[in-house]
Image (cartoon, rainbow, N blue to C red):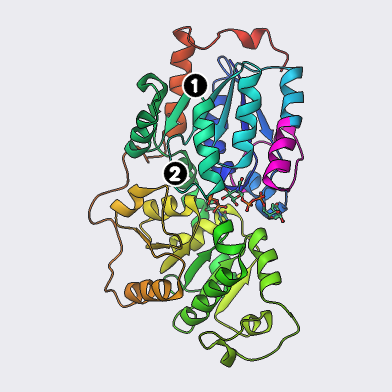
Amino acid sequence: MKIDLVVGARPNFMKAAPVVEELRGDPEYFRVRLIHTGQHYDVRMSQVFFQDLSMPEPDIYLGVGSGTHGVQTAKVMIEYEKVLLGDKPDLVLVVGDVNSTLACSLVAVKLGVRVGHIEAGVRSFDWEMPEEINRLVTDTLSEFLFTPTVDADQNLLKEGHSPDQIHRVGNVMIDSLLKHREKAEKSPILTKMGLEPQGYVLVTLHRPANVDAQEQLKKFMAAFAEIQERIPIVFPVHPRTQKMIRTALGDPSDRSGPDNLQKGSPLTEGTINRLRNLKMTDPVGYLDFIKLQANARLVLTDSGGIQAETTVLNVPCLTLRKNTEWPITLERGTNTLVGAEPEGIVGGVQKILSQEFPPGREKAGVPELWDGKTAKRIVGILKNLALQGQLFTNSIHRGNF
Ligand code: UD1
Ligand code: UDP
């Protein structure tokens, strides 16, 4: 069976790596092409993950880069269509919810190639998130829906998908987390950054709704300024957010002091630079980031994947949003939605620091099937489908890759 596996952006790499490994481990049945769209291209947003995850280099790099949604999605479609017109696989596997996921699925089905979606059925029910649109459309286009949770199955059933299409396999990004956790513990990042285990808060922020509007971004920065007075903050800043912080904070030559950080006062890059306990860095690699998560007192984030990873690591997570596509993390008790207003964020952090808000999963364990074997299950299902004749067979002997 010839399979194309698509990656494009940071959260795709740790989801794809275990699947490539599993498929390449069975060369009699599977021949896989790893397609990298180039949606993310900075070394720290892409290349570092290939090294950290010991993932093979992409077979095909589409090099699409950044752009508006229309431009980026269209460029992926144009470039991937050329690849498929040259040589069609039997199946295209896509992961997650980024523009590359949607674009490659759409090109594939229009050329009669079947699509399997890994992390299907996940919903925030927030139509303002570009990812929600990508998820819904990709699931509509996909024949094989590999889901991480019971709620994802239910979402798909309510949307009218057939139970035969739905395969609950667990959360594939947890395969990578469990596989690399020990290696990540050896990362020297804490020493390099002068941090003590349990002695800092880890922050990430990149959702357009949170960072693209200056007023909202300033609110977050004001909350972080307040929090760092109690406990150091480490903030590896996503490139989208770096760009917006530079725009929002205005004159970088401003050197006014932290006194300016009273509520409602202007927050400038000058004042941010003077907040000694707010350590802003470029995004860090996977192993460093896992080490930072595992040892954090708590995590503040608007990332989807990090809500899931903190649940497995049993680290308290405050999600800087009003909704989540990972309700199971709320049920397990590791994650809490605190929204985007400084009062809620600072209040949530204070509760955790003063132990009023005991974190943890006392209520229940790690979610079912988040056990490091998800990729194995996916590949097992594909093999069975092939054996039953539901997915072409022997085509690896016909293809030319
Ligand atoms: C994308 C995904 C989002 C995911 C996030 C993970 C979509 C719609 N969004 O958002 O779901 O959570 O990735 O990180 O697919 N940039 C760089 N270097 C890079 C990549 C991006 O500087 O390597 C900058 C560019 O200015 C770009 C901006 O970041 O315009 C946004 O990148 P883009 O891929 O459009 O969306 P993300 O915000 O990264
Ligand atoms: N991550 C990383 N370095 C960072 C920030 C995040 O390696 O500086 C990893 C994190 O451990 C998780 C994934 O990136 O595996 C989450 O991706 P992101 O937050 O960009 O996207 P989302 O999950 O929100 O789509």
| Residue range highlighted in magenta | 52-77
For disc 1, the marked residue is 143
Comparing marks 1 and 2, which lies closer to the viewer?
1
* Residue 52 image position (x, y, % from top left): 61, 48
At 33% from the left and 39% from the top, the residue drawn is 151
Query: Could you classify mark 1 by the number of other residues whose Cα lies within 10 Å: few (under 14), some (14-19), or many (20 or more)?
Result: many
Q: What element carries label 1?
A: loop
Write down the quadrant of residue 341 in the picture: bottom left
Query: Could you classify mark 2 by the number of other residues whose Cα lies within 10 Å: few (under 14), some (14-19), or many (20 or more)?
Result: many
Write down the quadrant of residue 159 in the picture: top left
- Seen from the viewer's position, the closer of residues 137 and 224 is 137
For disc 2, the marked residue is 174
At 58% from the left and 18% from the top, the residue drawn is 30
Type of amino acid at the residue the image marks with label 1:
Glu
Write down the quadrant of residue 265 in the picture: bottom right
At 54% from the left and 26% from the top, the residue drawn is 141
